[in-house]
Image (cartoon, rainbow, N blue to C red):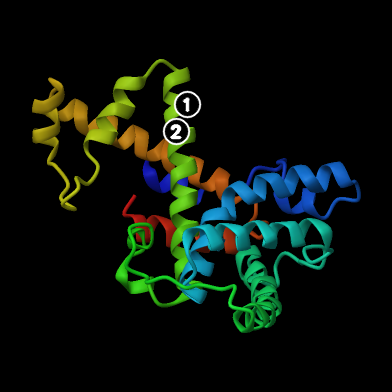
Amino acid sequence: MDTQDAGRRDLPTTRWSLVAGIQAGTEEARREALGHLFERYKKPIYHYFRVRWRKSPEESQDLTLEFFAMLLESDALKNFKPGQASFRTYLKGILKNFTLDQIDKMKAEKRGGKTRSVSLSDALHEMLPDSVGTNPEAALDWSWRMTVVERAMEATRLWFATEKRETQFRTFQSAKLDPKGERPTDSQVAQQLGLSESTVGNHINVVRVKLREMIRIELIQTVLDKEQLDEEYRLIIGKSGL
């Protein structure tokens, strides 16, 4: 199966969905689903607060935790209807309302001398590319895409480790961009690992197919509509160069 086949793969007929879990009637199911949602969205929402309010890492972490506590204690996610908007778009709407509430609190704290801001030039914020560094929603989207790829990459690594095919995954890792943003050639990777150039190319393609499959599996946890899934998938593949 080539990489395009993975991109066209239909949604599985059965799957556990975070959205369905969040909207379930039992408190236990909601808590479990929100826990998984937190792992997927804590970085994107954290970066939203960093850019939106110029807050310190510690304050942004606190706001992120407050946001998820609000989701747990309220019915904010129960009205989400797949097909009308992407889950991320719906979540942004909730985040905006939460932001308005927090602005009022911040004003009160500022009058009391309790708030502090930091420059966006610190080391943590430098993780964000310049193109999204001043737009909180763009920062959230970028961080979300990176989180999806990171989780899919780890799932891919574990799959190849379980199958005892670590060499293929290591080859793929060796072909990734270096710190200068340059991608080594297959010939350079082959020389580095002591493999033939054709073997390197084959390993890279095999891992890329599995990684794209894992990206789709990650996406279907919060994307229930097939058209939205395909759109999100194409966006991630295009932005990440995978």
**Residue 22 vertical position relative to residue 150 in the rendered view, above or below:** below
- Determine whether, in the image, residue 167 is placed left or right of residue 34: left
What residue is shown at x 52% (from left), y 68% (from top)? Answer: 48
What residue is shown at x 82% (from left), y 55% (from top)? Answer: 23
The amino acid marked with disc number 1 is Trp
Does any portion of residue 230 appear in the rendered image? no
Element under disc 1? helix
What residue is shown at x 68% (from left), y 82% (from top)? Answer: 108
Element under disc 2? helix
The amino acid marked with disc number 2 is Thr
Label 1 neighbour load within 10 Å: few <14, some 14-19, many 20+: some
How far apart are the alpha carbons under marks 2 and 1? Answer: 5 Å
Name which quarter of the figure residue 188 lies in: top left
**Residue 185 vertical position relative to residue 88 in the rendered view, above or below:** above
Mark 2 and mark 1 residues within 8 Å of each other at the beta carbon: yes
Label disc, if present, on residue 105 of the rendered structure: none
Query: Is 9 or 82 nearer to us in this picture?
Result: 82
Residue identifier under label 2: 156
- Residue 236 lies, in percent from the top left, at 43, 57
- Determine whether, in the image, residue 169 is placed left or right of residue 141: left
Residue identifier under label 1: 159
- Residue 233 lies, in percent from the top left, at 48, 56
Q: Residue furthest right?
A: 25
What residue is shown at x 65% (from left), y 54% (from top)? Answer: 222
